[in-house]
Image: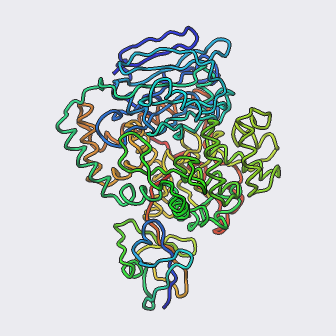
Amino acid sequence: MKLIRVNMGSKTIAVEDVPKDYSGLGGRGLTAFMINAEVPPKCDPLGPDNKLVIAPGLLSGTSLPNTSRISIGAKSPLTGGIKESNAGGTVAAALGRLGITAVVIEGQAANSELSLLRIDQAGEASLVAAENYKEMRTYAFLEKMLEVYGKKNSVLCIGPAGEYRLSAASIQSSDADGRPCRAAGRGGLGAVMGAKGLKALVVEQGGNSADAIADPDVFKEATKAFTKAVKAHPEPGQLMPNLGTAALVAPLNSMGAFPCFNARKGVMDGWEKISGEAMAELIKERGGKTTHMGCAQCIVHCSNEFVDKDGKYVTGALEYETIWAMGGMTGIDDLDTIARLDYLCDNIGVDTMSTGVAVAVAMDAGYKEFGDRAAAIEMVEEIGKGTEFGKILGNGPAAVGKHFNHDRVPVVKGQAIAGYDPRAMLGNGVTFATSPMGADHTAGNVIGLCLQGKLDPLQAEGAVEISRNLQIAMAAFDCTGQCFMATVAAFDPEPGEAFRKLLSAKLGTQLGPEDFPGAMGVRVLKAEREFNKKAGFTNQDDRLPKFFYEEPLPPHNTVFTISDEEIDRTFDL
Amino acid sequence: MKVRVKLYGMLSLRVPGYHHSQGIEIELPEAATVKDLLDHLKISESQGAVVTIDGRIQKAGDKIPEGVHARVFQSVGGG
């Protein structure tokens, strides 16, 4: 249980025990509490007072599968509020096995100096000059890192977009094969890392100084029960290993809730060409991988490897939100183009969702035609080249809307929505409006409950309550480092109890349902909302863009109908 | 009555010779419900099956109008 604090200005590293105020916290919970306590709320997100907190979850580094999600937090340059973005890969497990609760990047390097932070198998941290890697794209950088430090290393890094400090810049995370194709994409955390002068965190795998488990026997037994439930569940057990999250393209279009052509329509003509089913068929035909282990200790294997017609790797884990943003929103019904755009974003280090929506806003404003494949690729390439327009695009959809004086910009608190139109899935509209993160599907996605018939996607009734409960649950699970694909199983009573049991055994406490996810989630959300309030946010920031209230979405021709008063009751906690 | 059905996720593997471009046509009694449709396809709701018709998610007891196109999915919790 130690914190590694790195001051980029003085180039000093301090290792300390986790202070009492932060004990029992991990992942998103820890980033929320640290940022709320230590970052001045009105500071410049790209200045020396902001802090970048990199925290594995409470269960990362244990034997529980699917617990290698890394939470990264800071004040966001995109939203101006608190941010936690989490990513898969291998780094969370590597840090967990070293008993490192968080790495905190503070201060700012002088004269735009670039360094990387190396942590070896003994847990020793050191700063290394990284001037030679300036503006290097992430795939080439990863190859270089694994060449220099060896294959058994986990890397978090930024690409040129982070170094340019663009508001949609991501932090890329290396997957199980050492490719930088997992991303903490949301909220421009890559820009914070770039502003600090940090190119990468490189962590040696195979540490054996993980924090002790309070009750190893109970942990082992409950882990076995929970793992069995994950394997038996139809979603992580069958659907995800075969289609991945791209399985969502079909239901979303069939519900009329797939925002496309910059959210002008809810069903995309030609969506069957970019569905999960079509992608799996294409990948199989070409000899790629429809299922793939992307993250440490994964038993779900929702990842894939998309290959071109010659069978050559194009990109890894082409997922629903990217297919939606780069395909649906831009009107591009071609998987090869979408895969190329995904690769470019990972390589340049920008969020595929913000970038796809930014391209769509530019197209909606008349800059290019919807569906123009070459134009979309050229636009994203401009981000990597650092051209004037590339910098506007890399600052996200709101910056593009401002540039073109175009007001159809689907963002909340500056962050792009995800692939669920609030007019045809009101519950996700509540989540987008009220999440302290800005529009964020991972904060509390109601799609599962809609498909299970527990929430009518087109009705306001129940939407606020369900969004609230899901946001509380997700805030709690985001503390554990567990991937959502496995968390799905924990929503059933018996596996949910097994999960609480193993978490209790890890922490040495007895958690009841009121403690987890309940109290833990509320605690995290309160800290996040407190920070945002101090940063100047009010209820007026918990609103969707005007066009969602006024412009009916075909085919249901509905608008978002939940009143401001009801929205403001979401967090009567 | 005849109902045209398209299957998504892993459900198509249950029907030998299924071609997605055409889907399948099945014969159901008049006033058949969504549950009847799933029973006919030997898909249980516990497998997370979801049926949509005309852009709407159907409940197990909903009656299926004649001549419609139905889509059957597996439930997904998020992306």
Screen quadrant of the C terminus of chain A: top left
**Percent of width and height locating residue A542:** 60, 43
Q: How many marks?
A: 0
Q: Quadrant of the N terminus of chain A?
A: top left
For residue A508, what is the image quadrant?
top left
Residue A419 or residue B57, whichever sits in front: A419
**x, y percent for residue A159:** 62, 31
Q: Is residue B23 above or below residue A494?
A: below
**Residue A257 visible (yes or no):** yes
x then y, percent, for residue A9: 58, 11
Which percent across, then down, holds residue A133? 62, 23
Whether residue A36 is visible to the viewer of this picture, yes or no, is no
Residue at 61% x, 65% y is A273
Instruction: Give the vertical position of A262 relative to A214 (above or below).
Output: below
Question: Which residue lies most toward the front here?
Answer: A310
Tell me: A5 left or right of A79.
left
Camera-side residue of A198 and B53: A198
Task: Say left or right for B59 vs A505.
Answer: right
In the picture shown, does residue B28 fall above or below A210?
A: below
How did the renderer colour the structure? Answer: rainbow
Q: Which image quadrant for residue A137?
A: top right
* Residue lying at the far left of the rendered structure: A217
Which residue is found at the position 82% from the left and 52% from the top?
A366
Compared with A469, B57 (above or below) is below
Give the residue displayed 71% in from the left and 45% down from the top.
Answer: A358
In the picture, measured across the screen, residue A192 lies left or right of residue A222, that is right
